[in-house]
Image (tube, grey):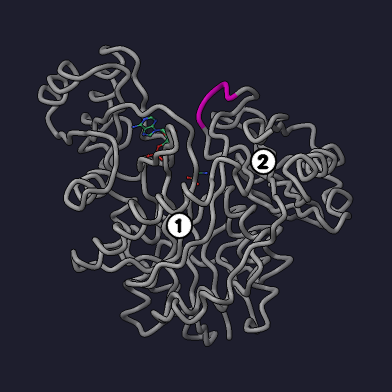
Amino acid sequence: MNILLIGSGGREHALAWKLARSPLCDTLYCAPGNAGIAQNATCVPLDIGAPQSVIGFARDNEIDLVVVGPETPLVEGLADHLTDAGILCFGASKAAARLEGSKAFMKDLCRKYHIPTAAYGRFTDPATAKEFIRQNTLPIVVKADGLAAGKGVIICTTQDEAYSAVDDMLSGQKFGQAGAEVVIEEFLDGEEVSYFALADGKTVLPLTGAQDHKRAYDGDQGPNTGGMGAYSPPPLLTKELEEKILTRIVRPTIDAMAAEGCPFTGVLFAGVMVKDGEPTLLEHNVRFGDPECQVLMMRLNADLADILLAAAKGELETVAPRVSWHPLAAITVVMAAQGYPDAYEKGTEIRNIDLAELPADVKVFHAGTRSEHGKILSHGGRVLNVTAIGETIQTARTKAYEACAKIDWPEGFYRKDIAWRAL
Ligand code: AMP
Ligand code: GLY
């Protein structure tokens, strides 16, 4: 079959790399892609925000399956447009993508279906929001309802901080329409794990978990980012904890979405806080994590095209026996442009990526690159994901850092302590 992958980050490079290995995949396209993805797919400069441009390309190129990587096109309804046009799509419908696109929707669903999550209130009026803040204990978490590129969550340790977060959001100054409503919730303490499962509307196919590092600098210091590194499997995720996450959070969510008339198809990424072995849902996402996806794809011992096709067709049950995980550990280290997550330079040259990925157990996924006259140039904040597998997290980590050291990119930086919790 011909597959069109939507997206341009490290997550999509990992998906492209895995899809390209499938015997089911004839031609793989990626829109818009990046310099690394171009090694696995034909990159096409489509406007992924314009459903008609994606539909037109899919028709002209006999695309059998569209796989949507990022959340924004899903929240905007790309899967619905494709489905209406008779094109098979792996990704949540607009109604189902509200799980990520509206925190208020997600929280109300949890309340209605008894899914464990932090206590909360939702507000559009600043005075009522502040009254709620006064009645609750600190720290307290203020969240913009809509998509805010990972910047819409403020953990506030003082009342004043929480008031300003509310004002910034509700005034529309910080996040525009995404901040027109806020969710204010109880602060949860514990250790976070990212858990992934596929769903086809009714059946759940559990995948596995990973842990990432959100802060920019070593020691989990500095500003929040999209993620500076990840590893899988996380030692925290015991069989017992996984079973709790599935029975208390993942399956009830998929059942709830079906009961609400918006069945969920795609990948459900539950961000879970774990305290004393008990999981509480922090957030749902309707996509693979980035960079978690990169370590998952290194460990997946199955044909990704086969699985995603089955999910899109509503036949997930049939592939479950064919999915397993390499017992190896995988780790990815994000190389970012200096300055990220604030202002950074683009267009700086990166050398020796080929040298870094010479060992068979190392793969460098591109997150934000473009090529020009045979050179690889940075083209984003998070730029490379240096990924390795090994017998243990420690051996995988050593290989990943050896590979990082070979990459010649003076304008980049990376954390030196990825997976410290696991070690
Ligand atoms: P989100 O944008 O919902 O993915 O949240 C981003 C990050 O904020 C999460 O990964 C957590 O680290 C943190 N966070 C969100 N909600 C809470 C909470 N209720 N308590 C503690 N930390 C939270
Ligand atoms: N790495 C966290 C995320 O993708 O949201």
- Where in the figure is residue 132, as x and y percent of width and height? 15, 23
Magenta stretch encompasses residue 222: yes
Mark 1 highlights which residue? Answer: 287
Question: Which residue sits at x=78%, y=50%?
Answer: 390
Is there any visible trace of residue 313 in the rendered image? yes
In this image, 201 relative to 17: left or right?
Answer: left
Q: Which corner quadrant holds the N terminus?
A: bottom right
Mark 2 highlights which residue? Answer: 334
Local crowd size for mark 1, using a 10 Å CA cut-off: few (<14), some (14–19), many (≥20): many
Judged from this view, the residue extending furthest toward the front is 240
Relative height, residue 54 to residue 290 (above, below): below
In this image, 374 relative to 108: left or right?
Answer: right
The answer to whether mark 1 and mark 2 are in CB contact below 8 A is: no
Q: Which residues are magenta?
A: 220-224
Magenta stretch encompasses residue 38: no
Mark 1 residue CB less than 8 A from any atom of ligand 2: yes
- Where in the figure is residue 18, as x and y percent of width and height? 66, 67
Q: Amino acid at mark 1?
A: Arg
Question: Which residue sits at x=29%, y=40%?
Answer: 117
Q: Amino acid at mark 2?
A: Val
- Where in the figure is residue 314, as x and y percent of width and height? 39, 79
The mark tally for this picture is 2
